Image (spheres, helix red, strand yellow):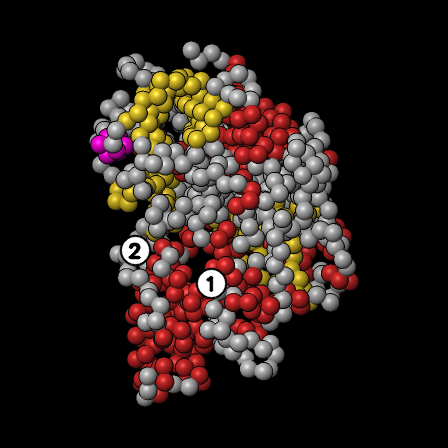
Amino acid sequence: MSQTSGSPADALSNRPLSIQEQRWDAVIIGAGAGGGALAYQLSHHGWQVLVLEKGPRHQPEDYRHDELAMLYQPFFTPDPAHDPHIVVTRKTTHGVRHKLGWSASCVGGGTEHMGAYLYRFHPDDFRARSRHGDYRELADWPFDYHELEPYYCAAEQHLGLSGDGAAMAAYSPRSQPLPMPPLHSHPITQRLEQACRRHGLQPSPTPRAVNSRPHNGRPACRYCDHCGGYGCPVEARGTSRNAFLQPAERSGRCQVRHQCMVTRITLADGHAAPLRAAGCEYVDQLGQRHRVQARVVALACSAVESARLLLLSRDERCPQGLANSSGKVGRHLQLHGVTLGWAEYPAQRHAAWQQTASSPFIGRSVYDFYQLPAGVAPLRRGGIIRFSAVSNQPISDAQTCAGNNGQVLWGEALVHRLHNYYAATRRIGYEVFHDFIPNADTFVTLDPQVTDPWGLPSARVNLHVDEHQKKAGQWLAQQAEQVLQELKPSRLHRAVTGGTTWHLMHGTCRASDDPAAGVVDKYCRAHDVDNLFTVDASFMPTAGIAPPTLTISANALRVGDYMVKQTFN
Amino acid sequence: MDIADRDTPAETTTPPAVQAGNTPLLAVVLERILPATGDAAPMFAGARAAGVCDYAVNALNEPRHQVLRTHLPATLRLLEEQHQRLHGCAFLHGSAAQQEATIQHLLDQQQQPFTLLFHQLINLALEGLLSDPRHGGNRASQGWRLMAYQHREAL
């Protein structure tokens, strides 16, 4: 796109602008894992906080076990037909409208529908370049695991993690136990653990932000087996909404405005560097334009959307985009590596399948492959294997049956394959979390043609997956399958090998002590803008092997602590 | 999920809406994807009786099915032409066995965009068979009963 000095948000200037007199201590843009945690931290230290969220505010009673509505229709994420991200790869000939890069668009963000597998990062995730050398765009973080550790403990308490902290301590050291014991497990879990141990592995309960007993005023899990992709109607899952934002609102010092789309960050008058943010402009659900003022502005809209907002906020003082004198805004985008599959077993094969179970969960994680053997892949960065029961999702399960291993099943053959499927079979799945290597061909810009419903350029995601991810995924899948083979499945299905998630993102505003190498400093403050912070995963120099959600919340608490200790007058 | 390995059809302008009543060919194709099994187990009454066809007409007009809706007329035209060539009659007037043979012929030939679109039609049919009945398909929970799926709400 041609870089003119005016902001694309000028396109909205024909709408009347309401300038609000109140000056907030902080305005936070985005109400997900980072924005919620920051709002909590600041409001509980006496700050007046405004949170602006583009999406709606769902209520627990909105959450049904409706696979079509929750997983297929646009409920948590925008409809790519109207509000897309445009994805370009080396193999695509056209930019594709896609939901890649939308975790969620609602109060609570992706935590509203997450599977809630909340792992900490490994200490080596903070020093990937030191550990693995100069490969692609690897970098060390400007702070280490130990600086974040107390905030991990706090985030685990707020969100309510169940699991076995002691068993995970060898993977990520901890100063406090998890607040709750593990969730109950299905009897087949014992057989799975035995199989793991016969392979020399040490399985332990997967840490989850799901209550194994009442916690922080929220009830224990009812084991309805509709977690990932669904909202929790009983609030047994800890989300940014119920763990951070609701307590913040109860303090009387935090206001959450939903369906408010921020169109640009505004700057204070004057040209002296560093710049200062004055607040932001947003469009509400009625199409009214507002300007709000704040001492501090914090971005928490996700790695893709935070970079987009900075690029949209350019003006004559920052013609490349706000906080972008380094040219690094949008660079170093990382998704997350994923490898997954499952084994299918005849229901009669193991007596444990026949037992009346108090829990459908299997929920065991294996950390033994954090480091790969030499020679498997370009780097020795491996993954976490998470074994689980496969939830019964009839539409997606049937679609898998119809398109299994390149074969197309239809007609009577399909009907017979579906017949009695859930009564006759049981499944154990595996999901390998592994990292996405930052590389020069994966980054975010503004699309030159496609716009969002507000007429602003959509994000254009350029995507390339490094060979490490494929090779690591291939090897890690084999390790998971060897364990599942022990239980004598009738078939193994590998769904994705070394693939890319569409909903976990990192990078785009890399944290670095060097203003020429990154966008924000170690406290996630923009090098160019004195009072502008990022508290989603955009600050992360590298993705961890684990999913980033817990780390996002922990870091937002850390950044909030820093803000409180500074004076932003 | 792994979009890095895929190419997809180019974006198009918004296609016209699909209307109930002018899609008899679509209904027959869906019936071939999920046919009635008669009195033999599993005693499934077929796509039409399970509400799949009604569901599909509504769902095709959702933005998320825009690509399928765009290419559907050409796909059905191809099917009709191939059936005429193979069996000398209109697809609608052919026997179930003839209709299946025509579809299989096009799949074997890997005719694009037929193969890609037929996969999407299978997925659409399964949405209609197995979604919550409040969406218009899965009439009397026939799809859930077929799979022995026990639906429960948490509350």
Q: Nearer the viewer, mark 1 or mark 2?
A: 1
Stretch of the chain drawn in magenta = A7-14
Residue picked out by circle 2: B11
Q: Do labels 1 and 2 touch, CB within 8 Å?
A: no
The disc at residue A405 is none
Q: Residue A264's spot in the image, x, y percent?
A: 33, 29
Q: Chain of mark 1?
A: B
- Taking A296 as reference, is A33 left or right? right
Relative height, residue B40 to residue A202 (above, below): below
- Establish whether labels 1 and 2 are both on one chain: yes
Q: At x 33% / y 83%, what residue is drawn?
A: B90
Residue picked out by circle 1: B136
- Taking B47 as reference, is B42 left or right? right
Q: Nearer the viewer, residue B72 or A310?
A: B72
Instruction: Residue type at mark 1: give it.
Output: Gly
Q: Quadrant of the N terminus of chain A?
A: top left
**The furthest residue to the bottom:** B88
Q: At x 68% / y 56%, what residue is drawn?
A: A483
Q: In what element is the residue under mark 2?
A: loop
Instruction: Residue type at mark 2: give it.
Output: Glu
Q: Chain of mark 2?
A: B
Q: Quadrant of the C terminus of chain A?
A: top left
Relative height, residue A491 to residue B98 (above, below): above
Q: Residues within 10 Å of mark 1 (few under 14, many from 20)?
A: some
Q: At x 34% / y 41%, what residue is drawn?
A: A459
Relative height, residue A279 to residue B39 (above, below): above
Q: Residue A76's spot in the image, x, y percent?
A: 47, 45
On whether residue A524 falls in the magenta region, the answer is no
Q: Nearer the viewer, residue A318 or A482?
A: A318
